[in-house]
Amino acid sequence: MESFANYIAGITHHNPGRLQPLYGILGTSELTEHILPHLDGYQGSGPVRIGNQAFEHIQNDVYGQAMIALLPLFTDQRFKIHENKNVLGWVNFILEKIEATIDEKDAGIWEFRNFANHHCYSNLFQWVGCKAALLIARQNGYQDMEERANILLKKAETYIEACYDEERKVYQNALDSQNLDASTLQLIVMDYLDPKSERARNHLEMLEKELKGENGLFYRYKHQDDFGRPKSTFLVCAFWYVEALACVGRVDEAREILERLLTYSNHLGLFSEDVTEDNGSQWGNFPQAYSHVGLMNAVYRLAIKLDKPIFSFT
């Protein structure tokens, strides 16, 4: 945990401007994307790329993501927070960045290359980051931090609620948009919506109606993006779906779907980024860390609900 905090601190020390959505494992910030024209790609699915153009993108959820990643440093008593002032400086840095970017449009979690918007998911994780900052402030008596976090929390809520469609009873993916997006499952998972509320149930049902595929697979969205209309499901969204089902109390259904999703790994138990609904073939980045993180979170969430181990490896 301390090593991770030092990694993040090293990135900001090197570049005190915006946080990028991704860095190299050694903290490299330049990840210029190149196409390798001599490679056909899996089953002719080229172009094959190295690097990642997304390092240039503005994705304003990153500040909230970083804040909650560092939250255990303040809540785990084994870590002596007052002995490492760099961490407190880092929390203030993130809060300042949320303050500076909360009114901005961005590329969103799915890294849209040719358009920007006020994305519900981005504002949600700014909200989550502010909630974490509030907890840190109250726990340590940081009054100025508490006041700033409260102001930003309310502003984030305003943007999120502006994405709500009263007629369809669902949160849309962005301001002034009619599109639905699996990333808004996180409104339930991250406790923005009370999982027991009618609003959470309605939101989940509408996402199921539009984005759910066979065997619990889930499309991240179905509207046209920079590359056309999506042809395959996005695996991490299916694991988010399992979490959301568990949160709203549909535990048996969540477990059944999780067990189906496990069948989409390869013979080594590894998952890709995308899965084609009609034949279960793996596409996109492989192996995809995002998918495996989604799996771990889904299993953990379900285990808490069941209060017992789910799988036996013996």
Image: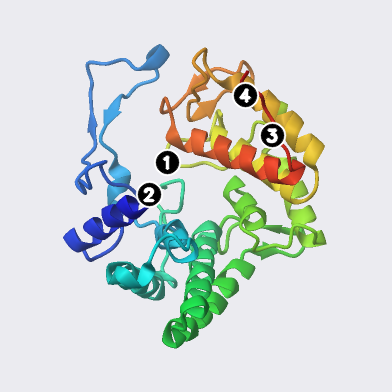
Residue extending farthest front: 78
Amino acid tagged 4: Leu
User: Residues under labels 4 and 2: Cα distance?
Assistant: 34 Å
Residue of label 2: 114
User: Residues under labels 3 and 4: Cα distance?
Assistant: 16 Å
Amino acid tagged 1: Asp
Mark 2 and mark 3 lie on one chain; the one further toward the N terminus is: 2
Q: Residues within 10 Å of mark 4 (few under 14, many from 20)?
A: few
Task: Tell me the element at label 3.
Answer: loop
Residue 73 appears in the figure: yes
Q: Residues within 10 Å of mark 1 (few under 14, many from 20)?
A: few
Amino acid tagged 3: Pro
* Residue 226 - label: 1
Residue of label 3: 309
Q: Are marks 2 and 1 in contact (CB under 8 Å)?
A: yes
| Disc nearest the viewer among 3 and 4 | 3
Q: Position of residue 173 (x, y in %)?
A: 58, 55
Task: Tell me the element at label 1.
Answer: loop
Mark 1 and mark 3 lie on one chain; the one further toward the N terminus is: 1
User: Residues under labels 2 and 1: Cα distance?
Assistant: 7 Å
Task: Tell me the element at label 2.
Answer: loop
Residue at the (80%, 61%) spot, across then down: 197
Amino acid tagged 2: Asn
User: Residues under labels 1 and 3: Cα distance?
Assistant: 42 Å
